Amino acid sequence: MSNISAVDIKVNNLAFPLGICDKTPEFSWQVINAQQQSAYRIVCSASINDLFEENFLWDSGRVVSNRM
């Protein structure tokens, strides 16, 4: 299994979004070091520490999709 990396990550086409009030934001990214993406999971947290401690504000769960 290869390491997969996501780059050029954006929310509503913004690279550094802050204060997004949109109830249905659009996420986008590019995948490198992978033949094809088969699923994704998006998590949001209040801080980097919360992210590592898996203290999420929102979690999409695993979504089976090849869309990026």
Image (spheres, grey):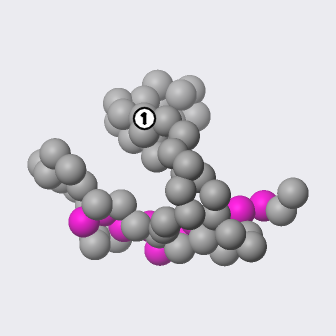
Depth check, front residue: 48 or 55:
55
Residue at image mark 1: 59
Specify the quadrant that holds the N terminus. Answer: bottom right
* Residue 33 in the figure: left or right of residue 24: right
Residue 62 occupies quadrant: top right
Q: Is residue 19 visible to the viewer in this orientation of the structure?
A: no
* Residue 53 in the figure: left or right of residue 45: right
Q: Residue at x 78, y 61 (%)?
A: 3
Could you tell me residue 60's position as x and y percent?
Answer: 42, 39
Query: Which residue, as the protein is rendered here, is positioned at the far left?
Result: 21
Depth check, front residue: 60 or 19:
60
Q: Residue at x 25, y 66 (%)?
A: 12
Q: Disc 1 on helix, strand or loop?
A: strand
Neighbour tally class for label 1: few under 14, some 14-19, many 20 plus, Cα within 10 Å = few
Above or below: residue 20 compared with residue 29: above
**Residue type at tag 1:** Asp
Depth check, front residue: 23 or 64:
64
Could you tell me residue 34's position as x and y percent?
Answer: 73, 70
Could you tell me residue 30's position as x and y percent?
Answer: 53, 73
Above or below: residue 49 compared with residue 31: above
Q: Residue at x 28, y 60 (%)?
A: 26
Could you tell me residue 28's position as x and y percent?
Answer: 40, 67
Residue 11 falls inside the magenta stretch: yes
Residue 17 occupies quadrant: bottom left
Residue span colored magenta: 3-12
- From the image, give the main secondary structure of the stretch colored magenta: strand
* Residue 15 in the figure: left or right of residue 22: right
Q: Is residue 13 visible to the viewer in this orientation of the structure?
A: yes
